[in-house]
Image (cartoon, rainbow, N blue to C red):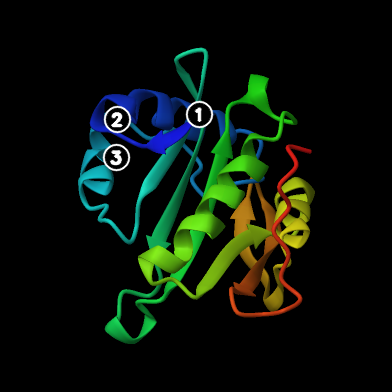
């Protein structure tokens, strides 16, 4: 089940996020974050920039947010997409379900453009974006250093009015 994230989901959201840090694939954070440090991030969400959680057996096992891009009014119809899935729930179609949900909701939120900022070595996230018709709009070479290794960042984009854009509905 996908639903809006609530304040009482924050410990699960933070735990899933922190589980992604050691793998050095999904975030540029190098140390775990705290629930308290993320509280204002959650409170700052609005109708256009929600957090959705995927709940299975009454536990949050994945989450997605549509973040503000660049913080200027001219970019209001563009969002940064972030998806995180708990380690034990990966490969079950949760990220696909969350992305389908976001794409279905986007028009009612006034969103026309999705952006993903993804490390080039994060093949699962690149594949997820490509599955939904995202294409490479930018390549920032060696802009992050993770454990002494310089990493490239890809900017993957999708215009919702692009006729080549696809929206998979399967859970694969």
Q: In the visual, does 151 lie left or right of 159?
A: right
Q: Residue at x 27, y 52 (%)?
A: 45
Up-down relation of residue 104 to residue 6 (above or below): below
Q: Which mark is residue 35?
A: 2
Secondary structure, mark 2, is helix
The residue to which callout 1 is attached is 1
Up-down relation of residue 147 to residue 36 (above or below): below
Mark 2 Cα within 10 Å, few/some/many (few <14, many 20+)? some
Q: In the visual, does 153 lie left or right of 172?
A: left
Of all residues, the one furthest to the top in this rendering is 57
- Percent across and percent down for residue 33 are 38, 35
Of all residues, the one furthest to the bottom in this rendering is 74
- Does residue 29 appear in the picture of this structure? yes
- Percent across and percent down for residue 28 are 53, 51
Q: Quadrant of residue 40?
A: top left
- Does residue 27 appear in the picture of this structure? no
Q: Residue at x 54, y 68 (%)?
A: 114
Residue at mark 3 to residue at mark 2: CA–CA distance: 5 Å
The residue to which callout 3 is attached is 38
Q: Mark 3–mark 2 contact, CB under 8 Å? A: yes
Label 3 or label 1, whichever lies nearer to me, is: 1
Mark 1 Cα within 10 Å, few/some/many (few <14, many 20+)? few
Secondary structure, mark 3, is helix
Q: Earlier in the sequence, mark 2 or mark 1?
A: 1
Secondary structure, mark 1, is loop
Q: Residue at x 51, y 54 (%)?
A: 102
């Amino acid at each position: 089940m996908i639903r809006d994230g609530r304040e009482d989901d924050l410990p699960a959201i933070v735990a899933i996020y922190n589980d992604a840090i050691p793998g050095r694939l999904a975030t540029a954070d190098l140390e775990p974050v705290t629930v308290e440090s993320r509280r204002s991030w959650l409170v700052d969400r609005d109708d256009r920039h929600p957090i959705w959680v995927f709940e299975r057996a009454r536990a949050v096992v994945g989450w997605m947010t549509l973040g503000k891009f660049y913080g200027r009014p001219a970019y209001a119809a563009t969002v940064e997409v972030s998806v995180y899935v708990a380690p034990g729930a990966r490969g079950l179609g949760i990220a696909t379900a969350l992305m389908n949900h976001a794409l279905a909701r986007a028009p009612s939120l006034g969103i026309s453009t999705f952006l993903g900022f993804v490390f080039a070595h994060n093949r699962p996230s690149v594949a997820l974006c490509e599955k939904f018709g995202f294409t490479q709009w930018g390549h920032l070479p060696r802009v992050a250093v993770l454990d002494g290794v310089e990493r490239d960042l890809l900017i993957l984009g999708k215009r919702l009015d692009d006729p080549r854009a696809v929206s998979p509905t399967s859970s694969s």
